[in-house]
Amino acid sequence: MKVESKSKIIDLSRSLQEKVSEIEFLQESFTEIGSELDLDKVFKIVSERARTLINADTLLIPLIDDDGQAYTYRGGAGVNADEIVGQSLPLEFGVCGWVWKHKKPWWQGMLNELSDEEKNRWEQEAGNLILVPLQGKRQFLGGIAGLNKADGSNFDKKDLNLLQLFASIVSVAIENAMAVKSMEVSHELNEEYRLRLEILNKQLIDSSKELERLSLYDSVTGLPNRSLFHDRLSRDITEAQRYDGSIGILLIDIDSFKDINDTHGHEYGDGLLNRIARRFDDAIQNNETLARLGGDEFVVILPGHDQAGATKRARQFLNSLKEAFSLQQNNIVVNASIGVAVYPQHGTTISVLLSHADFAMYEAKNSKIDICTYNQDNDHLAQGHLAMVSDVRQALKEKQFELYYQPKISTQDGRVVSAEALGRWHSHSRGNVPPTIFIQVLEQNGLINEYTYWALTTALSQAKCWQGDFKKHDDDIASMRIAVNLSPQTLMHPDFKKNIDKIIKNKEDGRLLTFEITENLLLSEFERLTEVLKHICDLGVELSIDDYGTGYSSLARLRQLPVNELKIDKSFIKEVVNNKEDEVVVHSTIELAHNLGLSVVAEGVESQQARELLIRLGCDTLQGFLFSKPLSKHEFKKFLDTQ
Ligand code: C2E
Ligand code: MG
Ligand code: MG
């Protein structure tokens, strides 16, 4: 990967990381607040949480009194809050009065909407104060105010957005708790009221679900982001499989967008992207999906379209750009290049389809034709593909595949704690074919399930065999788990549960296995996924997230699933000793995983220095050529004997 794009990815993953922790923090807050009906406690939680959220010195909750004549600071946290809470002021007084009147938030960006008199009065301290309205379901309540940013800077747009989001949701909880308080006062806690409260609190929990949804949309254009794109395409593929349908995929890349950004600045670029997105969105029909993959790349899913149909639609998207965009007194004409790939003809998995559409898009750019369909003959990697498919099919039938085993070593005592089973194929005509190649062929040709069940059966019987060998003299090795890599396709197949029940007969079997699954699997339909993973977990099998850091996963999801282990991808481990950024990523991943109760494996450990650093960073288990390459079952037995 180029250094530039790598650092872009790191930036992106940092901002995603930040977003994810904000969402997690908000979700946690809502769960805590939603389960509390004691008014004083609600004020306390709200003010403390809000104060942390926007990093304010002081946080106050001014609410309008019952008689509507004044407002009173009912809750607060931080500097001087104790002295202020309890004080009442006339309704029109100060910035609060302004917010009550206009029902709008106050922050520094509000200054130009003020009358000259108000402006003179408040300009000086505008940046130190932020105040957002609290609008209850039944009435206007008051607001949440932050005073002085703890780091001395001014409150900005991001603080405003976060605090508004927070206020819009906690207002329900505050209103509920106020209702309970007044009912307690009048001793009229009747059933109807209680039910109403339950409904309102349920709304609160729904709002927090809404937050997860927010993380599925791109903030610049409001279009589905890459995660949601994955979800939609996998749904459409399942559907197409059922009805033998086809799906067109268009990868649209705006030409020379970098130049536009460089000349006019990023804000202008974002504005333009937004306008382009609107044009494309207008061209979208019923069940199609338009998503932004990032940068200047858009993708369109066209269910029910074959190659000719998809190309025709591609032309319509290009036509929608014909008219110039007029933006900030500039007229700007935008062109794009489109790569087309079609399911199932050009691939059957999301990653293959995307990479083929990407390949076609580059063809289009290079040859200066605006639309290009994927053509295997130009794809040198894919040449000879058909012969390969037939060889792989043969290999499966004739049981030419083998499993090799690579030890995973504990950082505690340097002993083998488990082994990863890795597929090997020595083809008579081709020599050794790497698993990355043949697994992909198996996946693309509907053969992966058969292979995976073979691998599982083989690994389990091998584990039992070693269990017998070591039972008497080494309990640890006798109970060692073997990790098998599972393709998402197999795991999400409707027959998966039935099939593994046939292989893993009881918990004794399950305790000898770990399934390694990839991060992107976590983007699958959540309810199905939870059900499948829970079934695996009930069988005693452990779950490990493989190649962590290379895909897209939501931490919020990770926490809700019965996962035991994260394997940090070897691309981060390779340079961890020399590259500070990789070290930071690895370190924070380890901390994060430990916070979520997961253990961490580093794969691809090749040097003594890497081993020492990873131990220092708190890694639990190591795997790599430093200890051993993947070994045949006989070699692996010898390796265990020397332990
Ligand atoms: P993986 O599951 O991430 O497996 C780890 C890969 O890293 C293995 O490559 C292993 O040989 C390699 N490796 C281990 N230590 C080191 C090291 O210190 N340095 C370097 N450079 N590499 C190291 P391998 O065996 O070529 O497998 C590649 C990928 O193919 C696997 O990645 C896995 O995704 C897939 N694969 C292999 N066997 C199977 C299988 O039975 N089923 C499925 N679904 N996928 C498999
Ligand atoms: Mg693996
Ligand atoms: Mg891996």
Image (cartoon, rainbow, N blue to C red):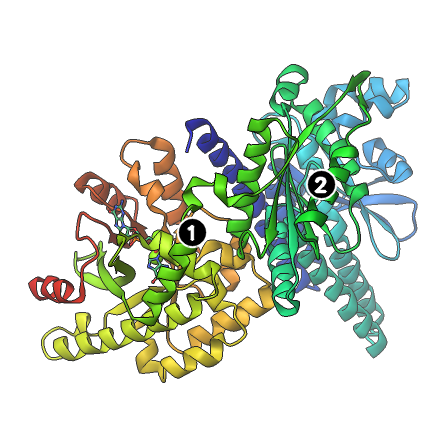
* Residue 321, position as x, y percentages in the image: 77, 30
Sequence-earlier tag: 2 or 1: 2
**Mark 2 and mark 1: span between their CA atoms?**
27 Å
Contact (CB < 8 A) between labels 2 and 1? no
Q: Which residue is mark 2?
A: 314
Q: Quadrant of the C terminus?
A: bottom left
Q: Nearer the viewer, residue 579 or 69?
A: 579
Residue lying furthest left: 642
Q: Nearer the viewer, residue 53 or 59?
A: 53
Q: Which residue is mark 1?
A: 385
Residue positioned 41% across, 53% down in the render: 593
Q: Is residue 628 visible?
A: yes
Q: Sort mark 2 into few (<14), some (14-19) or many (20+) by Cα contacts within 10 Å.
A: many
Secondary structure beneath label 1: helix
Locate residue 338: give its quadrant. top right
Residue positioned 43% across, 63% down in the render: 563
Q: Is residue 60 visible?
A: no
Q: Determine whether the beta carbon of the residue marked 2 sits less than 8 angstroms from the nearest atom of ligand 1.
A: no
Q: Mark 2: which amino acid?
A: Ala
